[in-house]
Image (cartoon, rainbow, N blue to C red):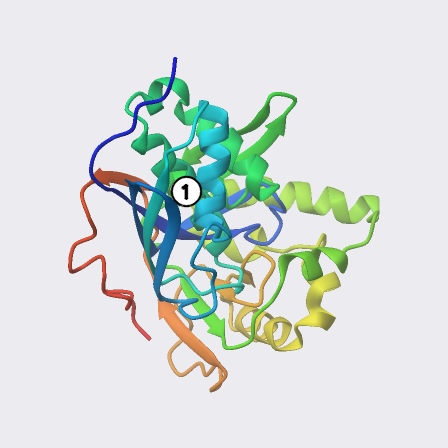
Amino acid sequence: MPLTFASGPVRVRVPATSANLGPGFDALGLALGLHDDVAAEVTSGGVRVSVTGEGAGELPEDDRHLVARAMRATFDLLGGHPPGLALECVNRIPQARGLGSSSAAIVAGVLLARALVTDGPARLDDDGVLRLTAEIEGHPDNVAPCLLGGFTVAWTEPGGARAVSLPVAAGIRPTVFVPAERGLTATARAALPVTVPHADAAQNAGRAALLVHALTAEPALLLPATVDRLHQDYRAPGMPGTAALVSALRAADVAAVVSGAGPTVLALGEPPSGFQAGTDWQVWQLSVEVRGATVARGRLGHAERDPVAAGRKS
């Protein structure tokens, strides 16, 4: 059956995410209270993208934009394309910092494309959205919390990605330390060895299991639960400032890890009074985003068009 498209715009709000959380490499993720807002509308021809906030003046404003590319992949799967698209992106998630900006763009594109097709949810259900976003991104650890919210455990089966979202224990207040410098996931992955010692893999399995318990039931165990031997030490030479800050926070009994592939540092709690990260870092206290991505009809409102992240403390 040919596609029919919705009249008028649709909009989506997608959260930042932090993947790995120390030992949960490519499996664990957390949705954070920092969001991008994106709206899309079918037009008579061409692809036009406007970008406000993070990435403005740098990101492409045509069909090369990642949101537009994710929409195109979704329309391919759904079986047809609109004549044109107009996109409005208000970005607050820092680009290339380890906070899931690319996953947020992919999730936004897939959800917007589905919402613009009148029977989109019947053609592509929520499980299909997770599989498609993970396929586009390459792994599910960021797209899962972006879609589902909260603390997620993701894995991949022969049929594609799957994930569950678990409630986070009360009192966990993430703090992110965001540097001016950027990092590339491909570069960070290139630093990883092909094999690791069995003892290191065994320790990470135990700590990742403990982290599930610590995040959902017993936050007092977060410091030992976030010990990692699979990726952070191998990546440390490429981002020495990140490694030093993680070490300093952990020495102060704060459960700190590299956020995703870095260079942002995630602390699962507030630093002690008087702790100084230095002038190279922006420090934001964020909430855990429990809802994940949300979709609505209509254009972006005044609040959504504000490129400043409301409510974050620095």
Q: Residue at x 34, y 23 (%)?
A: 121
Q: Quadrant of residue 172?
A: bottom left
User: Relative to 270, is 63 on the left or the right?
Assistant: right
Asked if residue 116 is positioned above or below residue 286 in the image, the reply reads above
Asked if residue 34 is positioned above or below residue 135 in the image, the reply reads below
Q: Quadrant of residue 92?
A: bottom left
| Residue with the mark numbered 1 | 109
Residue 24 locus on image (x, y percent): 60, 46
Q: Residues within 10 Å of mark 1 (few under 14, many from 20)?
A: many
Q: Nearer the viewer, residue 253 or 275?
A: 275
User: Relative to 221, is 186 on the left or the right?
Assistant: right
Q: Nearer the viewer, residue 155 or 43?
A: 43
Amino acid found under the numbered disc labelled 1 = Gly
Q: Residue placed farthest to the top in the image?
A: 1
Q: Residue at x 46, y 23 (%)?
A: 79
Quadrant where the C terminus sits is bottom left
Would you say residue 254 is visible in this rendering?
yes
Q: Nearer the viewer, residue 306 or 228?
A: 306
Residue 120 locus on image (x, y percent): 34, 24
Q: Residue at x 80, y 46 (%)?
A: 199
Asked if residue 262 is positioned above or below residue 13 in the image, the reply reads below
Would you say residue 151 is visible in this rendering?
no
Q: Quadrant of residue 40?
A: top left
Asked which secondary structure carries label 1, the reply is helix
